[in-house]
Amino acid sequence: MGLRSMFRRSSKRGSASAAALLAPVARSDRFSASDLVSEATSDIGARPGRLVMTILGTVLGIGALVATWGFAQTASGQISSQFARASSTQVSITPETTSIGQEGASGAIGKIPWDAPERLERLAGVERAALISDIALDENAEITSVPLNDPSAASTAVPPVRAASAGLVEAVDGEMKTGRMFDEGHDSRGDRVAVLGARAADRLSISRVDNQPSVFIDGKAYAVIGILEQTQARAELQDGILIPAGAARTDFAVDRPAEAIARIAIGAGPQIAEQAPLALASDEPDSLQVRAPQARSELGAAVEGDVNLLFVIVGAVSLLAGGLGIANVTLLSVSERTGEIGLRRALGATRRQIAAQFTVESIVIGVLGGLIGAALGVLAVVGVSAVQQWTAVIDPLVAVAGVVVGALVGWVSGWYPARRASRIEPISALRSAG
Amino acid sequence: MTAPVVELRDVTRSFPGPPEVQALKAANLRIDRGEYVSIVGPSGSGKSTMLNILGLLDRPTVGEYLLAGESTGDLPDDERAAVRAQFIGFVFQSFHLMERRSVLENVLMPMTYSGVPRGERTARALEALERVGLGHRRGFFPGTLSGGERQRVAIARAVVSGPSLLLADEPTGSLDQRTSGEVMDLFEELNAAGLTLAIITHDQSVAERAARSLRISDGRLSEAA
């Protein structure tokens, strides 16, 4: 009894009989972390073929994840520079619409002022702004270049007519093929002048403006002063006819602009989106809807998102397979090495040391897989970028993270086999084997 | 007074059934320092339970096991492992050498667990190999050695940490008659140099070479001679 209570009192550092039995061992001579690592790693290369199969899944998984990350980084730079001109410099402001009545008809609840271009151009980042509105012509209205009443002619769809302000061509980054765009003077005087889109001009058989051709829009003569060549945005302008807003107000009763558009500096999108409604409708900024490019192009983000998701799934599945592979092979190696485990236990290894040995072994396998996978992933990004003449962008931390994930996979996969190894009973192991 | 190396007091080891099996029944045993004891018995007689208990690989259900005069019943697992590393050397029937490590590395391995000062390890391993007559084989791999040589490597490994007790479990079971003789001669030399030896075997001729022979039958231990 006295003996037993003595044992109990002899706190954490071993019991009394152990103290009497055991010679003290200097700290430097104990089973150290480096002993553990050398015991755990000395047999890893024993079966190279099996090692390759073991790490293959981890290599693929880490490789896919690192490559995904690299491709995403590379692609986001790539996509935004490709689509920059088309999508990252155009802002469109329209009135918010709401449905009115039960038929689902919708009406505008906001109003864009006629002086919107001036107001917008005062904002930092806006290079040129303009107004544009579709003009609804009568159902049987005709547009011709000669006032000819030919009842036998087949009726054709008329080209769309739009009321615009003077800055439109610059706002959409367009060029004139011939002639000129109308200016503020035409607009304020209500002059009947028109600028034709290139395809509309073809249809109306007008190819030059120096002979002062006219078009008849619903019977009213408009002098053609210019033909549009091409525009970077708003390709639909090619098919239509532009007239100054002043004339449109008198001739076609256009009472409010339908849309304000602006060309902005790259990257100014988010800020313009916030400021434009306040500039145009300071009393009711919510009544206007702004479509402005995101800091990174929306298109780029969408493409990137799809690609990323796919690769992340592929990577995760391969990692899972890789982890199961490591677990399986480590388990096999535990059962093959039952004798060795029993021997080590008999020679004085604790259960924890045995478990640690197999855990470290599978972590090392995981790290190997992570290293190879990360290297292959980076190579893939660099290789594909070289072939596609992209600029390869990859954060070095991604490769480091790949190795760390590999180690984690090894650790998790090694847990169960290590537990099994630590539970092997020495004598049964030593007697059965061999 | 020097305490005996091994003292078993009414040690019983039973395995819960059903039916409950008593593999060792109220065994009393005293092995003094420098003794050479053989424990002989047919298979299933309780030999391996005896080996487990003596080697601190199992605990008695009832009774007490004193090693060098100290009770071992209350030692936690990790300390039993440490006591095994410092006090007990094991030799097995099937050698259990690590095939992918050289003879020298095999002999070095137990010292990582027993805490022999690092600077002395290689010298001690070489000395142990000289003692078993295999100094010239230090760089060989176990696969290239004969059975007798392998068992001698295993014996070098068992004695390298300087144990107080050497437990041999059927040490000649995998060897032919001539090499068995060599191994038994080696045991006698080690015993003559002061090592306490307990050999567990079913082979009567091996058992007879020990100074003292015990018989185990159906879990009961008795002096044979």
Image (spheres, rainbow, N blue to C red):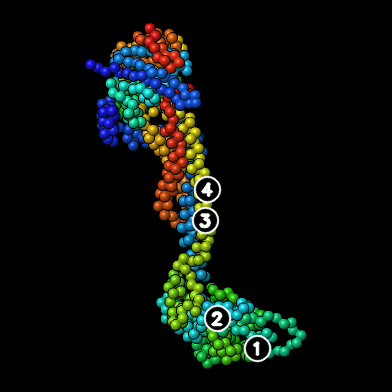
Which amino acid does the dot numbered 4 rest on? Val
Q: Mark 4 lies on which chain?
A: A
Determine the image quadrant of residue A135.
bottom right
The residue beneath circle 4 is A317
On whether disc 1 and disc 2 are found on a single subunit, the reply is yes
Of all chains, the one bearing label 2 is A
Residue at mark 4 to residue at mark 2: CA–CA distance: 50 Å
Q: Return the x and y of residue B11 as percentages of the image width and height.
A: 37, 20
Residue A368 makes an appearance in the image: no
How packed is label 3: few (under 14 Cα within 10 Å), some, or many (20 or more)?
few
Q: Which badge, 3 or 1, comes first in the chain's sequence?
A: 1
User: Which is more foreground, mark 1 or mark 2?
Assistant: 2
Q: Which residue is drawn at 58% across and 78% down?
A: A99
Question: Circle 2 sits on which residue?
Answer: A108
Separation (CA) of disc 1 from disc 2: 26 Å
Task: Kindly identify which residue carries mark 3.
Answer: A309
The secondary structure type at the circle numbered 4 is helix
Q: What residue type is labelled 1?
A: Asp
Secondary structure category for the residue under label 2: strand
The first of marks 1 and 4 along the sequence is: 1
Chain holding disc 3: A
Mark 3 or 1, closer to the camera: 3
The single residue placed furthest to the left in the displayed view is B1
Give the alpha-carbon distance from disc 4 to disc 3, as whole Å: 12 Å
Residues under numbered marks 4 and 2 in contact, where contact means CB atoms less than 8 Å apart: no
Residue A218: give its label.
1
Residue B152 on image: x %, y %: 39, 17
Instruction: Tell me which label, 1 or 2, sits earlier in the chain.
Output: 2
Which badge, 4 or 3, comes first in the chain's sequence?
Answer: 3
> Which residue is located at x 40 percent, y 49 percent?
A400
> Which chain is mark 1 on?
A
Q: Is residue B25 left or right of residue A255?
A: left
